[in-house]
Amino acid sequence: MIHIKKSINAWSVDGKTGFDEMFSLLKKAGFDGVELNVDKEDSSAHSLTMTTSTEQLSEIKQLCEKHSLPVVSISTSLYGGKLGSPDKTIREEAQAILKKQLECADALGADGILVVPGGISDDVSLLEAWNNSKRALSELKDEIKERGIYVCVENVWNGFFTSPFDMCKFIDELDCDYIRAYYDVGNVVEFSATEHWIEVLGDKIKKIHFKDFKRNGGRLHSGGTWEDITKGDVRWDKVVSELRRAGYDGYLTAEVFKQDDSQSFADYYSEISKQLDAVLSM
């Protein structure tokens, strides 16, 4: 039987909590791994940044080992539309972010990073952003292969991947074994059935984000709100079934945020862990 493991993004953690305490709390809550983020300076007490040193990464790695909680992937809040920009200088900024993520992943033992292609605007068409994003990633393929770390493109709310076929086409055109999909279950619920994306993407999925979304009136294209996992309109039984059918055996990374001010963060982490357990038991 395929064993799927539980992870959580560090954005879900109290921003005042440092690495040592964070790893301890998440391990006690029942998580098998954690996803760290490259953010702006002083974003949180547990953010990586563009200036995080080799020595700091080594210290973080030692803390991971102390708590037996591996870093499973490296995300970031820094891309915006940079990867698909028509400005070469801006694309190079995006490439520098990607290289930093690779460096962090390599040092911390993670096998994948999250990358956001895009850059559509009033002045940049979808086709232009598509070609620019592909160009920026293609220029790094040799380094990606040398690192042996998966670069996983994510579907976000930027109008770039509006169907799973878009993601497949983008990945296929890059033609690199180490460029795969980072599929976000919740980001497509407003306009489609999320399990259908998994059916199409199949074994292209290397990483996955879990969160839930409730449509207004239960209707597609009606807007909605973020909800706790299992409280929205994601059909979790079908999601898990399709993931198992695809042979997915990686981590499910919860990317969620505490909404109840009266709840302690420790209780919140335990609640998320139990929600993932409930999903995996379906």
Image (spheres, rainbow, N blue to C red):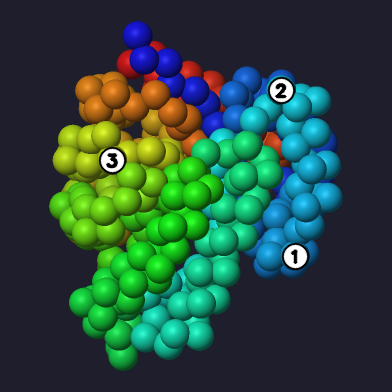
**Residue at image mark 2:** 68
- Label 1 crowd (10 A; few <14 / some 14-19 / many >=20): few
Residue farthest to the bottom, as pictured: 123
**Amino acid on which the number 3 mark rests in the picture:** Lys
What's the mark number on residue 51? 1
Residue at position x 61%, y 25% from top?
Answer: 31
Secondary structure at numbered mark 1: loop
Residue 4 image offset from top left, x and y in percent: 43, 21
- Label 3 crowd (10 A; few <14 / some 14-19 / many >=20): many
Decide which of tag 3 and tag 1 comes sooner along the chain: 1
Residue at position x 39%, y 24% from top?
Answer: 249
Q: Nearer the viewer, residue 176 or 214?
A: 176
**Amino acid on which the number 2 mark rests in the picture:** Ser
Residue 53 image offset from top left, x and y in percent: 79, 57
The C terminus appears in which quarter of the rendering? Answer: top left
Secondary structure at numbered mark 2: loop
Q: CA distance from mark 1 to mark 2?
A: 26 Å
Q: Nearer the viewer, residue 173 or 80?
A: 173
Residue farthest to the top, as pictured: 1
Q: CA distance from mark 3 to mark 1?
A: 32 Å
The N terminus appears in which quarter of the rendering? Answer: top left
Residue at position x 31%, y 68% from top?
Answer: 134
